[in-house]
Image (cartoon, rainbow, N blue to C red):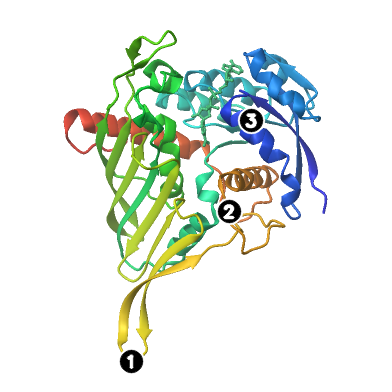
Amino acid sequence: MSGRRVNVGIIGGGLMGREIAAALRRWPALVDHPADPQLVAVCDINPAALEWFAGIDTVRLTTTDHHELLADPDIDVVYIAVRHDLHEQLYVDTIRAGKALLAEKPFGIDGAAADAILRAIDETPGSFVRVSSEMPYFPGAQWAVDYVRSGALGRIVEARCAFLHASDRDTAKPLNWKRQQRFCGEAGVLNDLGMHTWHVPLRLGWMPETVSGVLQDIVTERPGPDGTPQPCDTWDNAVLHSWATHDGARFPLTTETKRIAPGEKNTWEFEAIGMEGAVRFSTKNPKEVQVFALIDVPGVGREQSWQRIDAGSQSVWPTVTGPNFESGFSDAILQMWAAFLAEHQGLLGDGFGTVRPEEAAATHRIFAAAIASHQSGAAVAPRG
Ligand SMILES: NC(=O)c1ccc[n+]([C@@H]2O[C@H](COP(=O)([O-])OP(=O)(O)OC[C@H]3O[C@@H](n4cnc5c(N)ncnc54)[C@H](O)[C@@H]3O)[C@@H](O)[C@H]2O)c1
């Protein structure tokens, strides 16, 4: 099967823009995908950032003005990876230009920006918008989601999702836009990494009733462009304790979103513990899924057992990769794009889709509740 040609434009040719360009070059790894994406245009206000894309022979337009990219009638889908304070304007322009959009997190710098993007979606017939969140596309993460959906947990006891970094432990790391409220947003690390901790819980229907936020600004100054210390005014770490409901039972749901978790590089973890079963997955050991069960031990009887299972390579969309091989970050990015473009064509079926706009907007309500809770010391219900 050869897929329908989909012309892709990227706005923001930084860290993530380059990652996506590379992922699209691995498209032949997907088996019988209904889309055949080709990167044709890239926009970045910094001409130096565009130079890297000269090595990709399908790119026929590079520009420093996103209006020029959006005016190109042959571009079907746009991926945008820019500073959070620029999301609202660029996303709204893209939606109103009639392009399908894979938007980067946090989907606007705050709840008001997310609502403005939702309005543009509502007012644009045929719009298709999803938000980037790749970690659930690790095969082990998909197993964990499927395990929870199977009903094997029995009555749920508790669940946790975490996303852990540690490069900010280095206090000499220069200040950048992600460490300043005016560019990153008041929610700080939650804007930066919180979509990673909430995509799976929200998709499982675990919208919290109340949130208790414990937030930390650990490094308050960082070297500016000339080396002198400048204010670094974003939250570094955020632990949110909340109450959610699964199959009619309330349970404590904890998310941990941290830039300073010593020892961690890009660790995404999920665990759900029930009375009958439980499941754990961490990208720290990306092959392994742990499953709890009661088993019959020969000569002993019925016992509790945590079992370790290798997940292999297959995730949402089948690939030519041998099923026993390992999966990594770039595979997760490819799978996220496979899910996004299959859903764009109405052919994802019940496969696990990328973040929906209303889920992204819900994260801003959760983050605002966490900040209010941190300030007041009381649990706060997300509003709106
Ligand atoms: N999904 C993920 O795992 C992941 C990882 C990192 C960052 N992100 C998100 O991606 C987005 C960008 O982060 P990044 O790390 O790629 O940032 P970055 O700073 O590396 O790149 C941003 C790029 O946007 C360009 N830019 C700025 N204004 C522009 C404009 N008006 N038009 C076109 N280009 C413009 C900059 O010159 C820069 O090259 C953020 O929303 C961030 O939260 C997602």
Percent coordinates x, y for residue 363 in the rendering: 40, 36
Contact between marks 1 and 3 (CB within 8 A): the answer is no
Q: Residue at x 43, y 31 (%)?
A: 192
Q: Quadrant of residue 158?
A: bottom left
Q: Is residue 56 above or below residue 209?
A: above
Where, quadrant-wise, is the C terminus in this rendering? top left
Which of 176/82 is in front?
A: 176
Query: Looking at the picture, does residue 246 appear above or below residue 266?
Result: below
Label 3 Cα crowd, 10 Å radius (few <14 / some 14-19 / many 20+) = some
* Tag of residue 327: 2
Per the model, the C-alpha gap separating discs 2 and 1 is: 38 Å
Is 52 in front, or is 25? 52
Q: Residues within 10 Å of mark 2 (few under 14, many from 20)?
A: many
Amino acid type indicated by mark 2 = Ser
| Secondary structure type for disc 1 | loop
Q: What residue is pinned by disc 3?
A: 18
**Where's residue 11, x and y in %?**
64, 23
The percent coordinates of residue 312 (x first, y second) are: 58, 62
Q: Amino acid at mark 1?
A: Gly
Q: Mark 2 or mark 1: name the one nearer the start of the chain.
A: 1
The residue under the point 47% across, 27% down is 114
Q: Which mark is residue 222?
A: none
Callout 3 secondary element:
helix
User: Which numbered disc flags the more N-terminal residue, 2 or 3?
Assistant: 3
Q: Give me the residue at 47% from left, 36% from top.
A: 360
Q: Give the side of residue 383 with respect to residue 27, left or right.
A: left
